[in-house]
Amino acid sequence: MRELTEAGERQVAAIAAQHGVGQEAALVLLHALAAGGGTMAQFSHPELGGMGQWSQGGMVMVGDMFNHALKARVDALCRALAALLRDAEPVFVEAAAQAGSGGSWPAELGSPTASGTQNGMGYALFPAARRLAVRQDGRVRVFDTGEHRIGGVSQQQGSGQVLVFSGDRGEVRLEGLREVGGEAHAPTPGPAPAAPAEAPPAAPTGTAPAETGPHGGDPILLIRRLAELHRQGVLTEAEFQTKKTELLARL
């Protein structure tokens, strides 16, 4: 898994500015060149004419096929980035070397096809799983990319750091993607739920409770039970007195 070094970020930004393209487009080409061994690239980005190809020796194909100025710009940009990959100073650092500092991505996503870091924010693309992982301040968030085929990223500075991605359908903003995972946060403690109220005894159907159980035939115990039902309002005064009289007659 590749991530740009800090020096690599500065060099890519300088090359992008030199050739009049956004850093996002330059990153798309850089990752495509890295996948092609530095001698060829297959890419897709609106600034680069959509889908295109480049190979060492001057073969350039862009979506806007009759735009010769664009072809020349893409060729010059690819040659500069390919030279950067061949430079003695490494442009990428393997994320495995950063595992001790929390640099790894969720293992269940597999291996990313592209990744990078910008000003403390990192990202990794997992097209096979249709996922995008973003790391900021030590926290990893995972997003569903849906039908988007994301090919690059740029970071806009303003009121805060914002990651904006490019795809086959145009610009894709991070806030427009559905978050599906990442590090769980403990819920804010709240008051304990109240215990459910006890259900009142079922209303009698005109008869006293059945005399069941080991003491069902003891009139004194039955009178106590009737008194409790009367106290709860289940039995009326007349019903209670009637049954009480019947039970007292057994003594």
Image (spheres, helix red, strand yellow):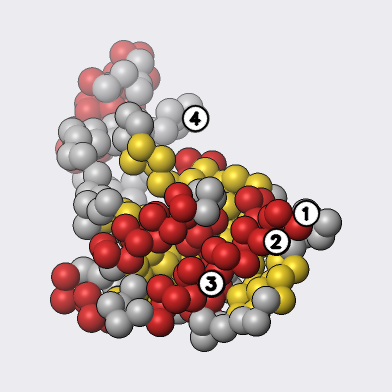
State yes or no: discs 2 and 1 in contact (Cβ < 8 Å): yes
Quarter of the image for residue 187 reads: top left
Q: Amino acid at mark 1?
A: Asn
SS state under label 2: helix
| Other residues around mark 3 within 10 Å, as few (<14) / some (14–19) / many (≥20) | many
Residue depth check, mark 4 versus mark 2: number of the one nearer the observer: 2
In the image, 81 versus 162, the foreground residue is 81
Identify the secondary structure beneath mark 3.
helix
- Which amino acid type corresponds to the residue marked 3 in the rendered image? Arg
Query: In the rendered structure, which disc, 4 or 2, sits on the residue that comes first in sequence?
Result: 2
* Residue at image mark 3: 79
Which percent across, then down, holds residue 205?
49, 30
Q: Residue at x 41, y 33 (%)?
A: 202
Residue 110 or residue 30, whichever sits in front: 30
The CA distance from mark 3 to mark 1 is: 19 Å
Badge 3 or badge 1: first in the primary sequence = 1
Instruction: State the residue position of label 4.
Output: 205
Residue at the right extreme, as displayed: 66
| Left or right: where 112 falls relative to 224 | right
Considering the image in quadrants, where does the C terminus appear? Answer: top left
> Could you classify mark 1 by the number of other residues whose Cα lies within 10 Å: few (under 14), some (14-19), or many (20 or more)?
few
Residue 45 visible in rendering: yes
Query: Picture coordinates of residue 121 (x, y %)?
Result: 31, 54
The disc placed on residue 67 is 1
What number is the disc on residue 71? 2
3D distance between C-alphas at marks 4 and 1: 92 Å
